[in-house]
Image (cartoon, rainbow, N blue to C red):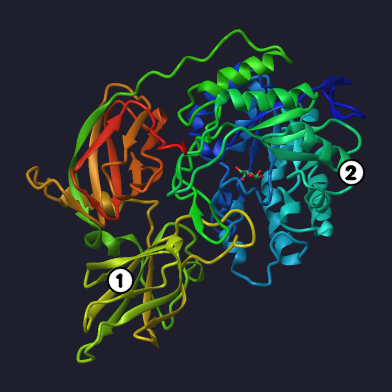
Amino acid sequence: MPDFRIGDTDFELDGQPFRVLAGALHYFRVHPEQWADRIHKAKLMGLNTIETYVPWNLHEPNPGHFDLTGRLDLERFLQLIADAGMYAIVRPGPYICAEWDNGGLPAWLFRDEAVGVRRFEPLYMAEVERYFDRVLPIVERAQITNGGPVILVQIENEYGAYGDDKQYLEALVALNRAHGITVPLTTIDQPTDEMLANGSLPGLHKTGSFGSRAIERLATLRRHQPTGPLMCAEFWNGWFDFWGSHHHTTPAAEAARELDELLATGASVNLYMFHGGTNFGFTNGANDKGVYQPTVTSYDYDAPLDEAGNPGPKFWAFRDVIAKYAPVPDEVPDAATPAPAFRAPADAVVPFWQVASALGESIPHRSIPTFDQVEHYTGFGVYCTEIDFRGTGRAPVLSIGEVRDRALVYLNRQPVGVLSRDNHDRAIGLPFEALGTLEILVEDQGRVNYGHRIGEDKGLIGPVTIDGHAHERWELQPLGLDDLSPVSEAFARSAAPDPEASAIAGPAFVRATVELDAPTDLFLDTTTLGKGVAWVNGFNLGRYWRRGPQNTLYVPASTLKPGANEIVLFELHAIPDATLTFVSAADLGHTEF
Ligand code: GLA
């Protein structure tokens, strides 16, 4: 049987020194029909290993509802890596960070305040054990010693940036070992003495995460990992974007120089990311270090392979660097070809309020609940109450403890205004002597994935007052947007939009039909839209927002079919011209310079 171990100076594969040249590729950010293509292209750049996290919350969105199929078929992903003749690194968390909703931790874990997340606390450890019971057998079977590709497994993720509970790390190690994980276990930390000391255990192989100044960072790592190979297990060759920021890019030549400096030391590497992919659906995370910054839908990351799987400048620059140190295949990937550019008129529009009641059940509450309190963990919800300020001579003020994350306020279905977490909005004036039904459509824009705000409740956080008084008797309707059949039925009943009056006021569902001879990647121009969510043939492409920087949504060829394809938008604000525009290439927005 093949054997992979950590020697005194090197990783060793079957007794021979082996340099890990890995690239991160998250199966959950790539359409499953495209996995093999992306893996193959990693090999063409000269990589010998694919690294992936495992997102617990996507596999188990509700307690006990575990999914390992389709886009979550980790076993198949690992098999494709093996089929490509490559090795694999698996990072099952339980926490993964990764600009992923809640850093991969299921929101339901936080319902019980007694659960001590990311530390040695029995309730939390019991849930971790249940999760590992499902995932680790897949990793166990795929280990190199069992004929599979897996050579390394990581414990936790940058734990030293969060805590120092060694008993917790020991328990994770014990669970991995108990599940038959025999390959070497690693930890990763940002290269500071404190984080490296807090985030690891004797006996685990320590690695670093950084994107520059390799010699200095490896020297720090060496102080904590006196023997064995040095590894940058996240070489940050790009970066992510958040709504309202610029699109982060780095010159390929500069990134290649940093990679060269790293490889010249003899170190092993995992490029973070080789191919970033897409935060489809409502899976993006967020940061909040004083200002809430939700990550955009694209996870292009300015990586060597772009979001659509095409080689960018870093692919060629990195291939040249890697070729100095390791054999690189002669075969090269095809360059990107322009996607078809065309326009598709909206052919059906349904006001949101017309279908709202079919999208979920309203639950009455005395005082206002959060989404989490009604076990709604993602997407949108509608709060509703009756108000009567007749005869007061005043415009009442709606005041909310905290908005997580964006609230559209309506009185009798007329828009009043928006409260936004990233503006720290807390209060809004309602119309003079307001009377009638107050409805608040709230969007969870993605849970924080780093630091101590992970696990926060979403929705409206109390106290909620109107005109200075606690307001009771609310209803909360979680919106179920996984199944759009009520919307499809409403489209079928709707009259075709008037081409003369082509503007669409949101919130509304909008449909357009795209005829294709053959499936091909498309890029939906979102600069002509407001803010919302887009689906193609029922597949949730993710959020769009005029705010940018992201100006297009990636539509993978594998979500399309020959003939008619249905595009659906849930537009919250307004579309001035009810025609969808598809453009020839991705536009991820303005850069800093
Ligand atoms: C850290 C984390 C990753 C990711 C990067 C930034 O290194 O370990 O999961 O969040 O930061 O992209």
Circle 1 packing at 10 Å, graded few (<14), some (14-19), many (20+), is: many
Left or right: where does residue 544 sit relative to residue 319? Answer: left
Q: Is residue 296 left or right of residue 154?
A: left
Q: Disc 2 residue type?
A: Gly
Residue placed under numbered mark 1 in the picture: 439
Picture residue at 41% right of the left edge, 68% below the top: 425
The x and y percentages for residue 368 are 43, 78
Rendered residue at 65%/48% (across/down): 96
- Label 2 Cα crowd, 10 Å radius (few <14 / some 14-19 / many 20+): few
Q: Quadrant of residue 280?
A: top left
Residue 275 appears anywhere in the view: yes
Q: Secondary structure at mark 1?
A: strand
In the visual, does 209 lie left or right of 573?
right
Where is residue 404? Give x, y as percent: 46, 64
Percent of width and height locating residue 121: 76, 65
Image quarter for ligand 1? top right
Residue under circle 2? 203
* Secondary structure state at the residue bearing disc 2: loop
Spatial CA span between label 2 and label 1: 56 Å
